[in-house]
Amino acid sequence: MAQKPAIPKGTRDFSPIEMAKRNFIFDTIKSVFLKYGYQPIETPAMENLSTLMGKYGEEGDKLLFKILNSGDFLSKVNDQVLTEKNSIKTTTQISEKGLRYDLTVPFARFVVQHQNDITFPFKRYQIQPVWRADRPQKGRYREFYQCDVDVVGSDSLMNEVELIQIVDDVYKSLNINVVVKLNNRKILTGIAEIIGEADKIVDITVAIDKLDKIGLDKVNEELRQKNLSENAIEKLQPIIKLEGTNAEKIHTLKTVLAQSETGLKGVDEVEKVFEYLSTLDVTTEVELDLTLARGLNYYTGAIFEVKALDVQIGSITGGGRYDDLTGIFGLKDVSGVGISFGADRIYDVMNTLDLYPKESIVSTQLLFINFGEKEALYSLKSLQKVRAAGIKAELYPDAAKMKKQMNYANKKEISFVAMAGEDEINAGKITLKNMTTGDQQLVTIEEAIEIIK
RNA sequence: GUGGUUGUAGCUCAGUUGGUUAGAGCGCCGGAUUGUGGUUCCGGAGGUCGCCGGUUCGAGACCGGUCUUCCACCCCA
């Protein structure tokens, strides 16, 4: 046991069956993206640390996997930094590359770098792994795939609506029941404005989020602990207690945020999105949720999050609008909005609910039994016709015992087995056996193809 | 990053207050059955008890460290 090789914490191997399942998810997501006019791009696994650092907050910087410089990197570090044992300072001298932490920042970099070749609005999708030095847990890995769709260079709320349609489309295709939570950074800013505590938005949303768990009194207590004034807490009450339908929430917000221009703008945006959605055939529930404060550092408008209804796991999709993401790389006034599907969590959800359509995981459909060299050659010729017809088929490579070959078919869940011995060869046919029913019949290759199809 | 949890055969797990040669089921391999699988019966292989160190006459069991698993917090997909 101990001598066995292992893989790093938080990473996984995927077997053929697991790959079939994962590919079903990727293929489904990809086909939806294409259907809405998004084009694929890929970026390298590693980026310059200068591209990555400082984009995800100070916590995020700690979660970046850094790549050691090549060569005798320590010899170039100055002695003072080395004796100080300051990790951050040392890191900048021994590492200049890191593994990507998400797909959004590399995409922003891509847009800036290729701005002259890009036609805006630019709709792209990107399905690649990302790495985070997080502590692993259920549904939390150190290497996992994100499936991002973003559109940059358009301020239209139509994009937000389209993204929700995509979410609806993907999860319907995958047969997962979800709820979309929608918020708007401008509303949060507005709330902070009217209560005069602009820098405490995060504390406020975190506290409000606990309402169901700990009750109103405890929430207010927590707000006091965060040094919010009584006056501010007083003004916050209608927002904490906000409930009802989306329309009711919007109505209340309009009153509460009457004095905040930004806040009203946010409410207006949310209202429009709901208005557009109501005219479309989107059956997934979309709920206005003010406690959604994800990615506050760079979202400026809509904030999305998708949760699975039947499995308790973190959010399986998230995203939002960022007005100025490319700004950090020197390209101003390019607004973008996008979402990221967490393929690995979707995979976990699909597994616990066993939602894979049976046909999505079949590999070989037809196995030819090997009776010896002469018979195998006959089978090989038949295989060409079968494969030309688009049927996944193979010949057992060795003239092993029948039992062993049949067993192989069982293990691989191959649905048909073909036998071609002397009699069949003389007749120019094969014996086709249905492995599910056990029935078998003497047929021509053409007939066999029809049966299998 | 903080607190907890887990590790024994390929898999799921037993293993008495520390005591001879560490077990079961499933799976795997072979045979009964030389062109017919899933069932049944018979036989077989497979373990430095996560790793390193300590206590002890003696450790799978106790202690320390370390790695790993899973969980809560944080954060997130």
Image: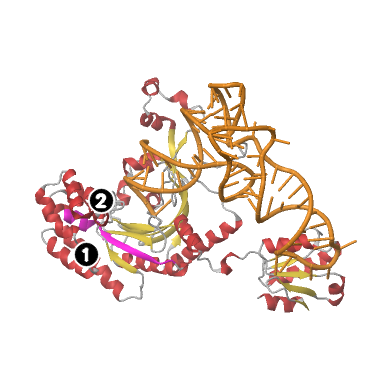
Q: Residues within 10 Å of mark 1 (few under 14, many from 20)?
A: some
Q: Earlier in the sequence, mark 2 or mark 1?
A: 2
Residue A177: in magenta span: yes
Give the residue at mark 1: A243
Name the residue: 33% across, 65% down: A159
Quadrant of the image for the N terminus of chain A?
A: top right
Q: Which residues are magenta?
A: A176-191
- The answer to which of A388 and A117 lies nearer the viewer is A388
Amino acid type, mark 2: Val
Tell me if residue A256 comes above or below residue A295 in the rendering.
below
Name the residue: 36% across, 73% down: A283
Numbered disc 2: secondary structure: helix
Tags 2 and 1 both on a single chain? yes
Amino acid type, mark 1: Glu
Residue A452, image x and y in percent?
68, 75
Give the residue at mark 2: A206
Name the residue: 38% across, 55% down: A314
Tell me if residue A217 comes above or below residue A244 in the rendering.
above
Residue A195, image x and y in percent?
12, 52
Residue A14, image x and y in percent?
56, 52
- The answer to which of A276 and A256 lies nearer the viewer is A256
